Image: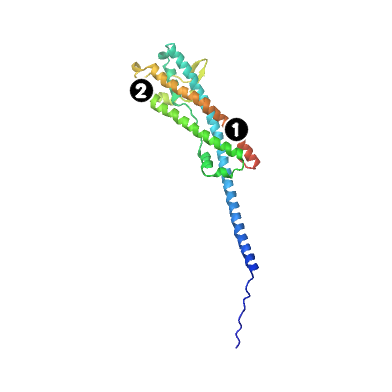
Amino acid sequence: MEVHHHSHKPKNWKEYITEFIMLFAAVSLGFIAENIREHNTELKNTNKSLITLYKDIKTDSVNLSVAIKARETINKADSIIMKYHNNRQLSNKINELYLFDFLIARRAFPKLNQMALDELNTNGKLNFIEDEILKEKIQEYFQFSKQMEARRIRENDFLDKHHDPIRIKYFDIYSLNLVNKINIDSVIIKDDKIVYNINSLNFNLLNANEFKETEYLNTANYIVSLENADDHYYIKPFQKEIESILIKLREYFTENNIKYN
């Protein structure tokens, strides 16, 4: 019985090279395809974050406008209260003083929406935005928003440490009569007077015999001075920054066929 032995012809070096090239090409293409898929996914997520950022900034813009109007009312009211003080009339204007103090306590410093902005700046998503001008504007907006937050904290800190102890001592701030009747829109400045559309408003100072107008007005005026500085150097410039970045975001969405409304 004959036994047949199968002979295996050895591969030449060209076949080994060909197989290596094919294997290398397959692995490389797979790697490239995976990178493209991941890039597209990250780009899609980045665009979603940009849409959220756009909506947040639009909301911030509205809040900023409301805050600026409220802070301008405080500034005007401060001038009127100081006029009463200088003319020795403030003791007869306790309702107006209460309203002024209420405006200070509820003064509006716009608190910004930070979630989408932080996400873009801390998760590396900015790297997937090819528009360098937009990236730069987002980074500038991020830094500006941090400055705004620092100023907000500074105002609150002064109010808590220096003004609140005085107002708590002399103003019936927990009175239901005050809380239920007054809101920011209740108080307007008209004809150089503090005007309020509230009926039966009749407030009295607590510990009135101890109340020192100058002491109270010093802290109130300092808060107003802080506000004026912040309005001039931060809030109003930030409002322009908002308008600029909204325009750039809309341009980016249009150029990349991204629906954002």
Taking depth in this image into account, of 223 and 12 the one nearest to the observer is: 12
| Placement of the C terminus among the 4 image quadrants | top right
Q: Is residue 261 visible?
A: no
Taking depth in this image into account, of 187 and 89 the one nearest to the observer is: 89
At a point 52% along the width and 30% down the height, the residue shown is: 63
- Residue marked by disc 1: 244
Give the CA distance from mark 2 to mark 1.
45 Å
Which is closer to the viewer, label 2 or label 1?
1
Q: Residue 111: percent from the left, percent from the top?
A: 49, 32
- Residue marked by disc 2: 169
At a point 55% along the width and 40% down the height, the residue shown is: 52
Find numbered disc 2 in the image and state the secondary structure of the residue it sits on: helix
Side of 69 where 215 appears, left or right = left
**Eyeballing the image, is 35 above or below 227?**
below
| Placement of the N terminus among the 4 image quadrants | bottom right
Q: Is residue 251 visible?
A: yes
Find numbered disc 1 in the image and state the secondary structure of the residue it sits on: helix
Q: Residue 154: percent from the left, percent from the top?
A: 44, 29
